[in-house]
Image (spheres, rainbow, N blue to C red):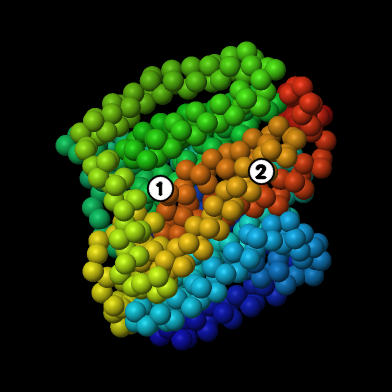
């Protein structure tokens, strides 16, 4: 059953690649990003019987895009990759070392099957090429800006669905997870109010989507937009923050607040010559958002505060988060682990479907990603993986110091904040939504310097100057 299915999939893949034009990879990547937002809705309500197949739909689109990008006829792609390797050679070396070590751990006998190891390689490395593709995905700052406005506007219907889930009873068809979910529906304890998941399969994935959208929305602050565009983005930000409260996730809401604080501190420091103007604009945006949330979604704030005040596991979870890597490093020595993919939530399902042997039993409880990386890759793999992420984080911070265009500078800083917020507390590997957005924003290292060659500069006095903006009617000046 498995071999014919794989043969058919490979044949379909070859046909798709052969029939598409060299530049079609851009459409495929953008389509995968849109599908990422709505695939959970398709899995939960439209095609629940094909849930697993729909889940891999975005990966299929990305795979075809990868093949066209790297093996197409256009030569500029290879030039950009070569430039990237020269500019960030340490990063590329660490990527290579991590992949080689991951390949070694894919053959770890503790996994019980190489197929589990291949699944592990997929969750760690499949979305990495997005960082390279992003450099050629957009040809100008205006094109990037236009795409982001449309993409972030999707948060409005998604957030509206979340609001409907919040006011609907937990037994409503709106409040379900994908078929086969092991955990029951999450609620605000005895309030009998559902913690919303929007169009996403699970609550955790939705939280990462909201955090990423909110950070990208902030990057438009100080950018000249049409009234329609400003209204769309402001409405999106209100829905994003309100839905963050509706998820009941303390980490999501905490990330939204921290990102807001550090981004606005960054604005005030960067444009200190315009301090009062920036401060007034910040106050106005917060005032409008606060009034809107208090009038339209007051119940979400009450529910979140109720849950936050009636839970006492914050300190214990934070303690476990920091202690787990040290404890787990002693299970297998410094080099060995249980194998890449050993703790991935879908590995057991893969074993059941394909009747694979069970891997070696892991004798400890695990939840945070830090501990799971240590269990899978061992101490050496743990150091290399977080060494790579630390180097990327430093490069993003240095990038925002070099960029001159205000909008691109904002993007570089929000990418830095996203990476910093996920370094310890996030789930980059074990949450595919976070992983996709992580490697996309890593691609800013290559994309933003290229786009910064277009007109748009900040003068030495810190005054905003940007000719590459939109006028009130939405046209380029």
Q: Is residue 49 left or right of residue 400?
A: left
Q: Nearer the viewer, residue 15 or 443?
A: 443
Callout count: 2
Cβ–Cβ under 8 Å for marks 2 and 1: no
Residue, x 62% and y 46% (percent of image)? 396
Q: Secondary structure at mark 2?
A: helix
Q: Looking at the figure, which quarter contains the N terminus?
A: bottom left
Residue, x 34% and y 40% (percent of image)? 249
The residue that label 2 is drawn on is 398
Position above or below: 14 against 434: below
> Which mark sits nearer the N-terminus, 2 or 1?
2
**Mark 1 Cα shell of 10 Å, populated few (<14), some (14-19), many (≥20):** some
Residue 324, given in percent of the width and then of the height, sits at 31, 57
Residue 362 picture quarter? bottom left
Q: For the residues marked 2 and 1, what is the alpha-carbon distance in whole angstroms?
A: 23 Å
**Mark 2 Cα shell of 10 Å, populated few (<14), some (14-19), many (≥20):** some
Residue 421, given in percent of the width and then of the height, sits at 47, 43
Residue 404, given in percent of the width and then of the height, sits at 75, 35
Q: Label for residue 285?
A: none
Residue 86 picture quarter? bottom right
Residue, x 30% and y 69% (percent of image)? 331
Residue 80, given in percent of the width and then of the height, sits at 76, 59
Residue, x 47% and y 86% (percent of image)? 4
In this rendering, does residue 77 appear at all? no
Position above or below: 407 against 102: above
Q: Is residue 360 left or right of residue 384?
A: left
Q: Secondary structure at mark 1?
A: helix
The residue that label 1 is drawn on is 425
Q: Looking at the figure, which quarter contains the C terminus?
A: top right
- Mark closer to the observer (2, 1): 2
Q: Is residue 441 left or right of residue 237?
A: right
């Amino acid at each position: 059953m498995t071999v014919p299915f794989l043969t058919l999939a490979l044949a379909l893949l070859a046909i798709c690649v052969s029939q598409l034009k060299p530049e079609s990879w851009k459409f495929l990547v953008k389509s995968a990003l849109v599908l990422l937002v709505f695939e959970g809705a398709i899995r939960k309500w439209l095609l629940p019987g094909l849930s697993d197949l729909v889940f891999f739909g975005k990966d299929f689109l990305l795979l075809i895009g990868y093949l066209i990008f790297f093996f197409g006829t256009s030569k500029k792609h290879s030039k950009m990759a070569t430039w990237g390797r020269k500019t960030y050679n340490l990063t590329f070396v660490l990527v290579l070392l991590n992949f080689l070590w991951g390949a070694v751990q894919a053959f770890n006998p503790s996994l019980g099957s190489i197929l589990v190891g291949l699944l592990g390689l997929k969750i760690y490395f499949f979305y990495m090429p997005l960082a390279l593709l992003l450099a050629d995905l957009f040809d100008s700052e205006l094109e990037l800006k236009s795409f982001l406005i449309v993409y972030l506007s999707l948060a409005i219907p998604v957030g509206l669905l979340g609001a409907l889930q919040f006011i609907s009873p937990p037994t409503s068809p709106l409040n379900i997870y994908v078929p086969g979910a092991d955990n029951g529906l999450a609620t605000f304890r005895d309030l009998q109010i559902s913690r919303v998941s929007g169009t996403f399969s699970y609550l955790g994935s939705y939280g990462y989507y909201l955090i990423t959208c909110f950070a990208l929305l902030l990057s438009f602050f100080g950018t000249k937009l049409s009234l329609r565009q400003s209204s769309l983005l402001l409405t999106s930000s209100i829905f994003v923050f309100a839905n963050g409260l509706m998820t009941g996730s303390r980490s999501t809401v905490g990330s939204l607040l921290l990102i807001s604080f550090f981004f606005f501190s960054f604005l005030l420091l960067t444009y200190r010559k315009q301090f009062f103007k920036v401060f007034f604009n910040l106050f106005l945006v917060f005032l409008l958002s606060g009034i809107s949330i208090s009038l339209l979604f007051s119940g979400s704030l009450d529910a979140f505060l109720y849950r936050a005040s009636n839970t006492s596991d914050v300190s214990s979870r934070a303690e476990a988060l920091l202690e787990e890597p040290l404890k787990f490093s002693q299970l297998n020595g410094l080099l060995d682990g249980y194998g890449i993919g050993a703790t991935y939530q879908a590995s057991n399902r893969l074993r059941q479907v394909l009747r694979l042997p069970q891997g070696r039993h892991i004798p400890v409880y695990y939840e945070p990603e830090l501990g799971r990386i240590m269990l899978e890759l061992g101490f050496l793999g743990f150091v290399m993986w977080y060494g790579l992420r630390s180097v990327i984080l430093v490069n993003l911070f240095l990038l925002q110091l070099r960029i001159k265009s205000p909008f691109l500078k904002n993007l570089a800083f929000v990418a830095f904040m996203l990476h910093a917020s996920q370094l310890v507390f996030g789930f980059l590997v074990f949450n595919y939504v976070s992983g996709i957005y992580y490697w996309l924003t890593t691609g800013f290292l290559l994309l933003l310097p290229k786009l910064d060659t277009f007109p748009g500069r900040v003068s030495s006095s810190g005054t905003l100057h940007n000719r590459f903006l939109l006028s009130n009617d939405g046209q380029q000046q």
